[in-house]
Image: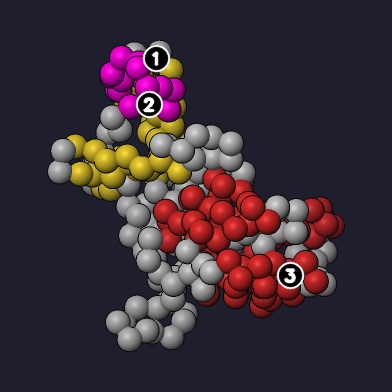
Amino acid sequence: MTAPYVPCSAAALGPAVMPRCCVHAVIGDEACELVVHHVRARKTGPRIPVTVLQCQTHRRAFTLYPLGHIPYGRLAVAPVGLDGELVCSTQSESKVDGRGEPAWRATLFGPAFAAIHEPTVKLTDPRWWATEAPEQLARGASILGVHPELSVQAADAIAFRLEIPRLVLRHAAGEYERARGRAARGQVLVAVLSQLGDACLLDRVLAAGACAGCWGTVTRWDVASRGARGRVFPGRGAAAG
């Protein structure tokens, strides 16, 4: 479960909205009664204290993550701030509207860029070189629908969620499967990212990652005129709705 985090004091960030229900609620249950249980430190992303909520109805606690972050994640899944606003790169050339390209390098897709531009990074570390980098690229490939182990149906479903033409993504999947070396694979992933534009990136990536099985069902809560508005991105095998 995720929500925008905004300044709540001079030195702290907190949720901008309280969800209407907890992660354990199902249709027919009594209304959830949520309270802040505690705030816990986090050593990995987003590297700020995150709020843990407790549902008095279901007697269960859960973490409310800032927008862009998921459980066990070190980096954001999309180039957005903790409040959900798009983060643009300061290194790229400006577009017509004066903004740079989305800052994908600072997300979990960063290894794809590193594979191209920094091919010798940590080459002397066998553990990182042998396992972590390939796993990171493979995860990015799954989210973007180009991993060779994805079925055609799953890849097409991811293309729909990313709003990329299926034939374009199938072509990229073929290139990824034929690629030799992490630099070549990184180039394929970066090319797919360039097709995404900058509209609704977080929602599209959350939906694609859930469809690929990279994370479970995600509910995004945002501030609405009547308190809170939730949007569900069903995980693989979960019923939509």
Is 227 situated left or right of 11 in this image? left
The residue singled out by tag 1 in the image is 58
Q: Which mark's residue is nearer the viewer, 2 or 3?
A: 3
Marks 2 and 1: CB-CB under 8 Å?
yes
Is 191 situated left or right of 120 in this image? left
The residue singled out by tag 3 in the image is 174
Q: Distance between the Cα atoms at labels 2 and 1?
A: 8 Å
Mark 3 / mark 1, whichever is N-terminal: 1
Q: Is residue 180 visible?
A: yes
Q: Quadrant of residue 235?
A: top right
Amino acid found under the numbered disc labelled 3? Gly
Q: Looking at the image, what colour scheme do you see?
A: secondary structure
Is 10 situated left or right of 5 in this image? left
The residue singled out by tag 2 in the image is 22
Is 165 situated left or right of 111 in this image? left
Amino acid found under the numbered disc labelled 2? Cys
Q: Is residue 216 visible?
A: no
Question: Where does the magenta region start and end?
Answer: 21-35
Q: Residue at x 46, y 81 (%)?
A: 92
Amino acid found under the numbered disc labelled 1? His
- For the N terminus, the quadrant is top left
Image: 236 above or below 79: above
Image: 95 above or below 83: below
Magenta segment includes 27: yes
